[in-house]
Amino acid sequence: MLPNLAQTLIRILLILVHLAGLVVAVLLLVRRRGIAPILAATAFTLLILLDAARIVQTALLPSIVRQIRSPHALPWVVGSLNCCCGFLDLVAWGCLIAALWLGMGRSEAEHEIRTEKEETSLPSE
């Protein structure tokens, strides 16, 4: 298992990558109105929040372990935190997949509309 410092550095790098994705999603939201950019922005925001929460969890987990008197309660606390974060992670990735799917379908539909307009605008001989 990686030391806490290495885990924190990896999480910070992931936050930066997800922040870049959020910037791209916001730019797409400004340029194109629709569901796909909204889903992408939501997903990247959730991923940033989850990475920040995992940094806090890594930092605070030793103090939480010291405060819990019963060793039987510790797996419940850690398990519930992981379950909640895992569910939100699943929702974020689902939003990203849905955004890609909707974005790809939209670009194909726009391409079909453009080709139909070009065909109708061609002069007939």
Image (cartoon, rainbow, N blue to C red):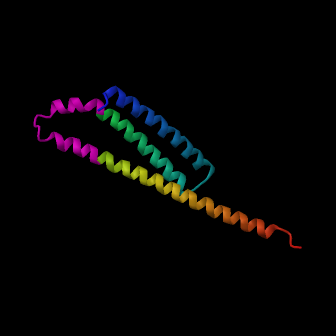
Q: Which quadrant is home to the C terminus?
A: bottom right
Q: Residue at x 57, y 61 (%)?
A: 105
Judge from the rendering whether residue 17 lies leftward or rightward of residue 73; answer left or right: right
- Compared with 60, 123 (above or below) is below
Judging depth in this view, the residue of 32 and 115 nearest the camera is 115
Q: Which quadrant is home to the N terminus?
A: top left
Image coordinates for residue 23, horizontal then vertical, percent: 54, 41
- Compared with 30, 10 (above or below) is above
Residue at the farthest front position? 1
Judge from the rendering whether residue 20 lies leftward or rightward of residue 115; answer left or right: left
Q: Residue at x 33, y 37 (%)?
A: 54
Residue at the farthest top position? 5
Image coordinates for residue 86, horizontal then vertical, percent: 32, 47
Q: Which residues are magenta?
A: 58-83
Based on the displayed image, in which of its 4 quarters is residue 119 positioned? Answer: bottom right
Q: Residue at x 59, y 45 (%)?
A: 27
Q: Residue at x 37, y 51 (%)?
A: 90
- Compared with 23, 107 (above or below) is below
Judge from the rendering whether residue 106 lies leftward or rightward of residue 115; answer left or right: left
Query: Any magenta on residue 69?
Result: yes
Magenta highlight: main SS:
helix
Image coordinates for residue 19, horizontal then vertical, percent: 49, 38
Image coordinates for residue 97, horizontal then vertical, percent: 47, 54
Based on the displayed image, in which of its 4 quarters is residue 120 positioned? Answer: bottom right
Query: Any magenta on residue 28?
Result: no
